[in-house]
Structures are given as structure tokens and as C-alpha cells.
Image: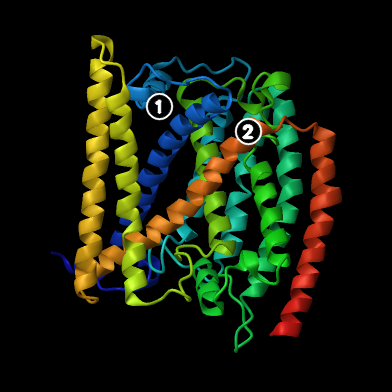
Amino acid sequence: MPNFIMSYLGSTVTPGEAGNQFWALIYVLIIFAGVSTAVICMNWLERKALAHFQVRLGPMRVGPHGLLQPFADALKLMLKEDIIPSEADQFVFWVAPLIGLLAAFTVYTVIPFGPSQAVSDMNIGILFMLGVSSLGVLGIVVAGWASNSHYPLIGALRSSAQMVSYEVAMGLAVVSAVLMTSLNPSGTGTLSMIGIVQAQQQQGIWFIFKFFPLGFIAFGIFAIAMIAETNRAPFDMAEAESELTAGYHTEYSGLRWSLFMLAEYAAMIAVSSIAVTLWLGGWMRPFPNLLHAPAWDFIFSLFPGLTFGGLAAITLVGAARMPSQSFFRIQRIGLAIFGALLGFLALLLLVIAVAGRSADASVAARFREGIDYVYWFVLKVAVFMYLFIWYRATWPRYRFDQLMSIGWKVMLPIALGVLMLTAIAGVIFS
């Protein structure tokens, strides 16, 4: 094997720090494929969960329990006619979806799924994240303006005001988390995303519980602001289907419209990942300092396999409970095959967990450790993604004046107060 491939395998830093462009590219491709797959899963899960919230079934026809519905939707969008309004600025109209998409995916270069499972560990990771994520609003504003239509322009203007307003409170909440990293013997904080997780590990507490309730309030402010930043209900004023037809992307169709949806869901996963990194211990499993014996490490390493095993059992039970009529035969077989694949993956993860216990320095141990890091990180992000669906099914949309009032009159003063109290608590207890 070439040296540029093998030289990184024993490294304990990110490919960016190691200067290995090949593995950095591999990480980028893995993240792109993983996020795209997560968007597909989220699309199906949201439709099914909203259906059950409203006492209906949701997608059921395309594949067993509608599992193939997202692929059918993607095929339909790619084959649909791509229409550009005659009076639109064609080049800007074409570029607008790419701006939001690139902004959403670029954030992932500094998101750590483990101590070395990231594209790069920048020493200004937080600033990079805030700067790049704020560029997403440009795609929305440009799309509304380039359409040369009234409703898209109104949606774009609403979005720009909304996102700029809530970015202020979000930034102050992030600064509160950064201040907590400075509570160490050297008294120096860090802007590195990996460094923030390591600070939580060294201090033995997730920052959501630090200086309680200050950390919890800062987390709450970020959690509310990230819903507004991604234009999700109840803050989906940029789209507002009942008022603005579809808002900023009214004139878009086919593949370009799907890019907006991909950017929105990718941004949802990105901001959830940031919240997990800053306040919920990132890749750390529960109680890593309290339960740190080798036996506990082995027990927690079984969780990925057991999770997929549980999903496989649920799937197989669902296949067995499907009606025995010939109409359901194909769907029943398909669901059973899907359950068998989940079961095989569960068995593979359990084998890796057991093999990794035998020798700490073995490749299996390092691989198991990496799987554990990614598993706990993804599990925490999945909770946030479910909350996005829950919010959409629960609350009606705010009026625009209510939305702006909350952002400037409630969120901003609370964020400033929490920031000052966090600084005072840091000085007192450091």
C-alpha cells in the first residue's frame, strides 16, 4: 500500500492536523454520504412520525412501510421539468440553491465525531462554524430576489431578518460554553471543537450541567435559536406555506427545489451536532469519568450492536405481523430482508466489541473505540432530530412580530445575562 495511505492509520489526530490530504478527502466523502443518507432517513421518519402524531399511516405503498418512498421522491424530482421564470435572473437563480447547500455541508469539516474522527481540528473551530453557518441565509435571500416574484421576495426578507436576529442570541450562548472551557489550571479556554469536548471530559461534567442552571439556560437559548436558524416550525416564516405559497422557493421545481430541502435537513443535523459538541459531551458516552473501569467500557461498547439488534427484532416482528394475503407478499419479504440486514449488522458490531476487548492495542480495539465514539455522537444528534419533528407536530407558527419580539426582547437579554453570570461564576469557582 502507498505510504500516504498507511502512514495515517496509526495516527491519533485528524487528517487535517496530520496533513494527509488523501484521508481528509476520504473523511469528506464519508461525511457527505452519511449526511445524505441521514437526510433520506429523516425524510421518511418525519413523514411517518407526523402521520402517527395525527393518527394516520403516512407512506405505506412504495416498499414495506414506505421505506422506498424517499428514493421514489428523489427519482421523481430528478425527472421533473426544471422551470426558470422568464423574468428571473437565470444565473443567480441557478446558483442560489448551491450557496445554502455548500454552507450547510462546509460546517461538517470542524464537527468532531470522535477525538480524531473529524476532517480537521481548527483552533478557531467555533468562529469558523458561526461564520460559515451564517452564510446559509444568503442562498435564501438570493433565491427570493432572483425569482423576480413578490411572495419569494417577502419570504426571503422575512428569513434574513429572522436569521440575523437569532444569530445574536445563538452567538452569546456559544460564548458562554467557550468561557466554561477556561476553568482549568492554566486558565486558558479554547475555540477548538475537539478541545471543547475534551474540556468537558477533563472537568468531569457536560456543560449543560455546568454552573446549573446557567449551562442549561445557555443550551436552551441555543436550542431555540437553532430552530429559527434552520427555518423549522414553529419559526418557519421563510416558507410559511399558508401565507406565502412556499416562500423563497415558490418558483423552484425539480432538482433545484430538492437542493433546498437537502440544505435544510443538512443544516438541521449540523446545528444539532454543534449543540451536542458544546453542551452534551460530544462523542463521550454517559458517565465516562464515574464508570471508567474496563468492564464498563466493554458493557457500553455492546450498545451499538444491541441497538441494531433491537431494530432488527422490531422489523422482523413487523414483517411477521403483516397480513398473509398475496398482495402483501413482496412487502413482507422486503421487510424481512431489511430486518435480516439489520441483524447481520448488529452481529458484526457485537463481534467487533468482543474482539476489541481482547487486546487494547489491536486494530479491532481502535476500530471498536471509533465505532463507540460515532455511535454515542449520532445517538445524541438523533434525539435532536426527533425533537424537530415533535415541535413541528405540536406548535402552530408564530406571527412575524411575535417571532422578532422573542428574539430581541426575550432571547437576547437572557443570553447577555447568562453570559455575564457565567463569567462571574467562572471567576468565583476557578
Instruction: Give 324 or 141, whichever is nearer the viewer.
Output: 324
Q: Position of residue 142 (x, y in %)?
A: 64, 34
Q: Amino acid at mark 2?
A: Arg
Q: Residues within 10 Å of mark 1 (few under 14, many from 20)?
A: some
* Of pointers 1 and 2, the one earlier in the residue sequence: 1
200 w.r.t. 328: above or below: below
Along the horizontal axis of the image, is 4 left or right of 33?
left
Location of residue 199 in the rendering, given as x and y in whole percent from the top left corner: 54, 75
Please give the residue where the numbered disc 1 appears in the rendered image: 70
Label 2 environment density (alpha carbons within 10 Å; few <14, some 14–19, many ≥20): some
Image check: 385 left or right of 398?
left
Q: How is the image coloured?
A: rainbow
Q: Position of residue 63 (x, y in %)?
A: 32, 22
Q: Which mark is residue 291?
A: none
Residue 35: name its quadrant.
Answer: top left
The residue sitting at 55% across, 47% down in the picture is 384
76 on left or right of 225:
left
Where is the N terminus found, in terms of image quarters?
Answer: bottom left
Q: Residue furthest left?
A: 1
Above/below status of 308 relative to 145? below
Residue type beneath disc 1:
Pro
